């Protein structure tokens, strides 16, 4: 129930912020009767209503819920049937943040280091971060993975990837 | 038919179809390489080819890519194409249960069957069905989008409120970019990269793939798939019987959506999923690894791969990005699709039909061949698997428009997906909102401009009124079902106390 309350509150704030931004969209001489602000405002209002409904439902459930020990531990499944991750005090969130950081560093580094080495570094960093041992095997897999992906995307499919500061290959 | 088989064996049509399907599966299986991108990459190579072979090569790539999108959807929870988004839910759930081989077998079998149905429809009904497409007005397209959105209630899982929340978030994301009528920039924050909006594939890759990577990173306990998952399994007779109905539903949806320019495989896959669930005697299994939940959308989007050519061949109207690339293939060789094509170049049309038959037969063989290394790959140790999924996601997303900004957007949707799991908010309504948002808004406003602001235009247009009526029936049916489920849950809770 606390989660639903938190979700409802967050979405309510989001809807208010979105409405404010939608209202600030400039009008145009070419605009139709609905205008560029029309549907965004409607979406924001609807999200506000739905968020309030979730908050009210959560509050009602909280007052009706029997105080059975352990009842709050029940984790419902989502539509895909998978259980939501349990957020433990620190470590899982840090691990999640670390995975995101690997992606962000790739974005920052790839324009300079180039695709092949950057993607090999992503593979190596992720393997290490996920508990794999850093050694010859991991290094070889990362480098060969980088080469295979470069061959696949750049050479075979002719899809451009960040070239980096390296001179172009013939 | 005998002539077609002879042509496949004795001419270059067979090898061209085989090569096109192989290329398409590879492209579709890579997140970020859409069917149209895979086809566009081939386009320059078709200049010097015989026109029939060139067209067959491109059309077969489309067939292969529509199927290929389901491979990462099932194995790594990442739809390779927009149309494969509906396959993610039950496909990945089956993979988690150690039934990846069975899920892929159902997907392949349903895809081939859908493709064959689509081919028959293409050959027999191209001319009469094209009249339906011509009758579509902006009001009808708006109603079509609303019909697509009406399945939100069915894909919302236990909480309709959270499903609506997700759908509204999706619709909000779809408003980012240049306004479709006035040209005003909305929610772009001065960024030129956002002027053309946020491509739905970025949202899907972020929610499903990056979100899954983050969730896996947060859960150290890793259950590797059972060894049985390493074997591909085609559906047995009992399973074939069970999935026959969802396949038929998917094929009908694929025909319906394919002949309408702009509708595409995504809407048909979601509608097919919704209807398969409605008519299933195993409703509770949907969302938790239902074979029917794979069969229906896969049959639908592979049917569309053929029926989407109906408006192109008969009217010269490319209804999707992929058929626009195919139109480019026709134009390169001095061919103009439309009624005159059947009169002036019947050999090209017959060659295309033969090529599509060969493509669907090739799909059966190549789908099997591709699955074996794919299944082997997903059974590697967790750190290596996650590393390669991450590398594929980063590479695939960059490939869409060569933009690291897009890579950042996809990564940015990862925490959103992670939070949605935490708060048990379903993904699919959001995907529907993102995919259909632009279509709904632009056609709603265009229809009103044409009708001088009169909302009755949506009821005066017979196709629009019919589609809106159908959407109302869908929503009402789902609302009643949710209400009945809620009452049942309340009674069970009271009985437990």
Image (cartoon, helix red, strand yellow):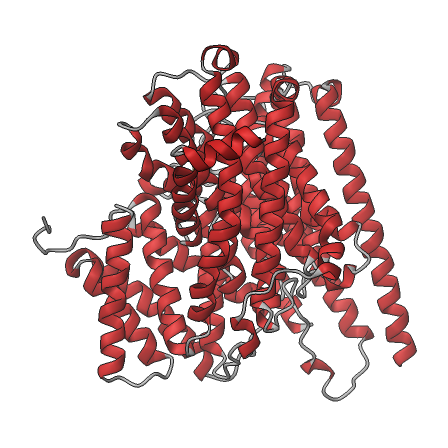
Query: Does the image show residue A29?
Result: no
Q: Nearer the viewer, residue B140 or A91?
A: B140
Q: Position of residue B453 (x, y in %)?
A: 64, 19
Q: Position of residue B22 (x, y in %)?
A: 41, 48
**Residue placed at 74% from the left, 83% from the top?**
A71
**Residue placed at 24% from the left, 85% from the top?**
A135
Is residue B251 found left or right of B378 in the rendered image? right
Residue B444, compared with residue B267, is above or below; it is above
Residue B80, compared with residue B271, is above or below; it is below
Q: Quadrant of the N terminus of chain A?
A: bottom right
* Residue furthest left in the image: A167
Q: Nearer the viewer, residue B388 or B183?
A: B388
Q: Nearer the viewer, residue B133 or B471?
A: B133
Picture quarter containing residue B388? Answer: bottom left
Q: Position of residue A37 (x, y in %)?
A: 53, 34
Q: Nearer the viewer, residue B447 or A12?
A: B447
Picture quarter containing residue B308? Answer: top right
Residue B434, compared with residue A147, is above or below; it is above
Is residue B127 found left or right of B341 in the rendered image? right
**Residue placed at 49% from the left, 54% from the top?**
B367
**Residue placed at 25% from the left, 64% from the top?**
A146
Q: Position of residue A38 (x, y in %)?
A: 57, 33
Residue B372, compared with residue B50, is above or below; it is below
């Amino acid at each position: 129930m606390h989660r639903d309350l938190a979700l409802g509150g967050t979405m309510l704030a989001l809807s208010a912020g979105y409405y404010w931004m939608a209202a600030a969209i400039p009008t145009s001489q070419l605009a139709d009767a609905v205008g560029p602000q029309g549907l965004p405002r409607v979406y924001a209002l609807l999200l506000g209503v739905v968020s309030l409904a979730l908050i009210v439902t959560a509050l009602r459930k909280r007052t009706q819920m029997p105080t059975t020990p352990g009842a709050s531990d029940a984790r419902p499944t989502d539509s895909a049937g998978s259980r939501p991750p349990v957020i433990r005090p620190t470590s899982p969130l840090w691990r999640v943040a670390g995975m995101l950081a690997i992606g962000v560093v790739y974005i920052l580094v790839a324009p300079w280091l180039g695709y092949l080495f950057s993607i090999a570094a992503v593979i190596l960093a992720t393997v290490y971060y996920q508990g794999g041992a850093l050694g010859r095997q991991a290094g070889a897999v990362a480098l060969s993975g980088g080469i295979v992906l470069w061959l696949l995307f750049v050479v075979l499919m002719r899809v451009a990837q960040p070239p980096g500061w390296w001179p172009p290959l013939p | 038919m005998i002539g077609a088989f002879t042509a496949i064996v004795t001419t270059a049509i067979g090898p061209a179809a085989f090569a096109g399907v192989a290329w398409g599966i590879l492209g579709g299986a890579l997140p970020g390489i859409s069917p149209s991108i895979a086809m566009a990459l081939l386009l320059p190579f078709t200049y010097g080819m015989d026109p029939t072979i060139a067209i067959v090569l491109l059309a077969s790539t489309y067939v292969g890519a529509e199927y290929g999108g389901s491979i990462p959807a099932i194995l790594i929870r990442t739809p390779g194409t927009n149309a494969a988004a509906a396959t993610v839910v039950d496909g990945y759930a089956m993979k988690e249960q150690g039934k990846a081989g069975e899920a892929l077998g159902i997907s392949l079998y349903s895809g081939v069957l859908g493709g064959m149905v689509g081919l028959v429809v293409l050959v027999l009904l191209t001319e009469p069905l094209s009249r339906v497409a011509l009758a579509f007005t902006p009001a009808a397209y708006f109603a079509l989008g609303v019909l697509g959105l009406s399945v939100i209630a069915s894909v919302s899982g236990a909480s309709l409120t959270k499903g609506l929340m997700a759908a509204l978030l999706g619709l909000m994301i779809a408003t980012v970019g240049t306004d479709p009528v006035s040209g005003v920039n909305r929610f772009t924050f001065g960024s030129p990269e956002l002027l053309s909006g946020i491509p739905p594939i970025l949202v899907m890759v972020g929610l499903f793939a990056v979100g899954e990577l983050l969730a896996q990173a947060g859960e150290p306990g890793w259950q590797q798939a059972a060894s049985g998952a390493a074997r591909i399994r085609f559906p047995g007779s009992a399973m074939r019987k069970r999935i026959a109905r969802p396949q038929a539903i998917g094929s009908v949806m694929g025909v319906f959506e394919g002949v309408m320019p702009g509708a595409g495989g995504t809407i048909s896959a979601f509608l097919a999923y919704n209807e398969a669930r409605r008519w299933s005697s195993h409703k509770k299994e949907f969302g938790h690894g239902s074979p029917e939940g794979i069969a229906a959308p896969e049959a639908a989007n592979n049917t569309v791969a053929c029926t989407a050519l109906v408006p192109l061949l008969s009217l010269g109207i490319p209804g999707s990005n992929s058929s626009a690339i195919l139109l480019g293939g026709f134009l390169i060789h001095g061919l103009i699709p439309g009624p005159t094509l059947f009169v002036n170049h019947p050999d090209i049309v017959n060659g295309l039909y033969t090529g599509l038959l060969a493509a669907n037969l090739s799909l059966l063989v190549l789908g099997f061949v591709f699955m074996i290394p794919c299944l082997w790959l997903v059974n590697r140790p967790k750190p290596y698997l996650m590393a390669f999924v991450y590398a594929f996601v980063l590479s695939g997303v960059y490939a869409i428009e060569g933009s690291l900004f897009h890579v950042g957007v996809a990564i940015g949707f990862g925490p959103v997906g992670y939070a949605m799991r935490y708060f048990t908010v379903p993904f699919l309504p959001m995907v529907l909102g993102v995919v259909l948002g632009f279509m709904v808004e632009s056609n709603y406003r265009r229809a009103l401009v044409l009708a001088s602001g009169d909302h009755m235009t949506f009821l005066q247009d017979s196709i629009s009124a019919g589609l809106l009526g159908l959407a109302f029936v869908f929503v009402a049916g789902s609302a009643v079902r949710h209400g009945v489920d809620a009452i049942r849950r309340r009674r069970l809770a009271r009985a437990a106390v």
